[in-house]
Image (cartoon, helix red, strand yellow):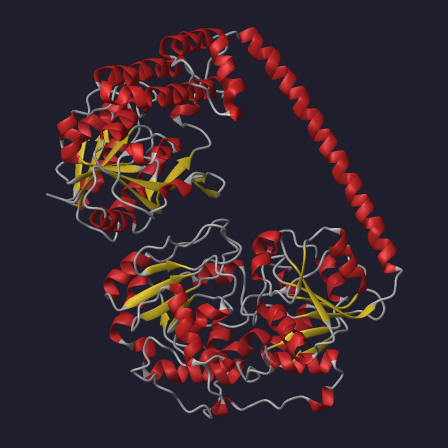
Amino acid sequence: MPRFSVIVPVYKVQAYLHACLESVLHQSFTDLELIVVDDCSPDACGALIDEFAARDTRVKTVHLKENVGLGRARNAGMEHACGDYLVFLDGDDTLTPGALHAISDRLKETDEPDVLVYDYARTYWSGETVRNQYANLLDEDGQAPFRLDERPSLLRLLMVAWNKTYRREFIEREGFDFPPGFYEDTPWTFPVMLSAGSISTLDRVCLHYRQRRRGNILNTTSRRHFDIFDQYDRVFAFLDEHPEFSAAWRPVLFRRMVDHLSTVFTKRDRLPRGSRPDFLRRARSHYRRYRVPGSRGRASSRLRHALVRMGSHRTYRTLWTALRVRTRARRYAATARRRAKGAALQLHYRIQLRLPLRADRAVFSAYWGRGYGCNPGALEAAVREHAPHIRTAWIADPRHHHSVPTATRKIRPGTAAYWTALARSKYLVNNVDFDRRLVKRRGQVMIQTQHGTPLKLMGLDLQDRPAAARGTDFRALLKNADKWDYVLSANRHSSLVWERVFPASYTTLEYGYPRNDLYQRATSADVARQRELLGIPQGAVAILYAPTHRDYRRSQLRALDLERVLQALGPRFVILTRAHHSYEAPLASSSGRLIDVSDHPSVEPLCLASDALVTDYSSLMFDYANLDRPVVLHADDWEAYEAARGTYFDVRDFPPGAVARSEDELTDIFATGHWRGSRSAQLRTAFRNRFCVYDDGRAAERVVRHVVLGEPGGLPSVAPLAERHPAPPAGVADEPLPRADVSEPTPRF
């Protein structure tokens, strides 16, 4: 008897079916059966599922002789199910990597509940991924399992079959099945949730709900949308048959029905032309039939409830026209206010430009208004330490203000204070460009810190790389570079690249990167504290996985099945996953030994907490090498990356450690110990000799003394690599890492 029976009804989804079935069969959790029901699909779905069944014995196929619809196709799948739990998956959706493992673990933690509700994300044809807006309702804190009356807010979730797993014995005992017609999930989900003796939640995205541009059943125009009335008749018939639920839940389901009916009616592409008045009349009839006296909807939905209660299409059209007029008027007014505000701010800026500079002011920012960190953050701290007479400010979006030190003034972009700071501060520091409208004044000093050692092509070198340049205005790029007074560099390689790809009259400060000072200054106590904050078990080997973005992709490349990697490596290993800041979605949700750290404000503490880095072509490898800890490259798509972006050298020929070209090779490198062997140490030493010469823990001090204090002749000398003592790793402290001779000559490339 398998743990899960995954039931997939298929009808006219041949273009998406392969991804759907592969997402199940490639799960790290393998104790499953996959029951695929061909609902007499006219395309190649039937042949495709037979091919899968021939390759994998876990696949069972059911071919129906006639099209019966999604609900009855699921029933056909349930007749063949043998698993402990039922999982429903539509043929154009996919399970996320590691989903079944996380679901199984949560079921065990919560004493095998009748129903487990998990999260999902909508994936659009454009590549955008958006998590369920009510994800907070799936919080795992508190008692579990529970009954629905203990957490009634769960009914605010999308009432569908595929965001839950069901104990098969419970479903069979209660005799639940799916009805025919559209909206078949409605009379299934409500009775199931009400009847479940135990429910638990899983706060993890386990399913990607595909939003097809065309072909989605519920987005088709048809009178079959009138099926919704029959489905709610079934819901209330269930309540009539179970009076123990009726008193408490009838008002709730009545409100849900009215919300649902109004939603179907207001979706402009669902009801055929001429059928809308009839739909409203039917809706009014249901409103009167099932109304519970005193039951009122939320304030935000009362207008829609009134629409259903009246059932007049003419009234609806009048209200809709009035709302459109009001919406347009508000939009025009908002545009006018925005333009007026913008003009006033620019006038304010022009006035501030005519006022004296404030020699004791410095303003910092990083990554287009994100939180405190990177080289500007390290420099800001160094200014407060070595030049306390300078008052510092940090420009960031309000949601990142919590990351800014209390001693530093917080400034919101686009405000009068923002333009005042840009106009009158003597020192301007950023790792990207400030607002293009900034006017560089005589006497202002602008420091461009950069934010990484360039492996990929940058600046003017992108002129022949349209996939990476994506419409970059190279004239504007050079205009911004002309405003720079100083550019920071971590090594000779960076200096040569910056001066060629950003040709301007700035001065290059080859002093190291300030953000890397932390690696030389942190202690073992700092490392232990960071690991405790992240929840890394004592004695575990923590791998930081931080891939870079791909210029040839709009969505994030999920190159590794991290759950599968962890399963292969065993319980001693933990993976910290960090998505690139250009992507919103995490690489994988936190689950057990897999910890998502994408929202952590700075990457440097994560590096301190880890024992090894796994990356691909990210510049983080150059910074991490300063810790003298193992680095493993996962270079599975080098040719595609090189073709789209271009690089300054082949990192596979001059790596900071072992190189894996596939997931299996990566797993083998860690399983055999090569990740921390003598050959990896030799490669890392050569890499450090080339790229880490100046990062001795005093880079920020050198910049402040040169630029702010005017002491270019009295700068701290650079400590040789052999004399540095970076923060030691914690997870493998009992097994010293191999170290190669740091005097070893640097290989040429």
521 in relation to 127, above or below: below
Q: Who's the residue at 38% across and 37% down the image?
A: 209
Residue 204: percent from the left, percent from the top?
35, 47
Q: Please tell me whether residue 136 is drawn above or below residue 567 in the rendered image.
A: above
- Camera sees residue 696: yes
Residue at the spot x=50%, y=89% of the render?
A: 721
- The residue at the far right in this view is 354
Q: Quadrant of residue 494?
A: bottom right
User: In the depicted view, which residue is nearer to us: 53 or 488?
Assistant: 488
Query: x%, y% of residue 446?
Result: 74, 69
- Residue 667 sits in quarter: bottom left
Instruction: Tell me where residue 56 appears, x and y as whole percent.
Output: 18, 46
In the foreground, 249 or 574: 249
Q: In the rendered image, which quarter contains the N terminus?
A: top left
Q: Report the number of numbered marks.
A: 0
Q: Identify the residue shown where x is 53% and y is 8%.
A: 313
168 lies above or below 647:
above
Give the farthest residue toward the left.
1
Q: Nearer the viewer, residue 153 or 45?
A: 153
Q: Is residue 95 above or below residue 718?
A: above
Q: Is residue 41 visible?
A: no
Q: Is residue 450 left or right of residue 504?
A: left
Coordinates of residue 356 in the picture (x, y in percent): 87, 65
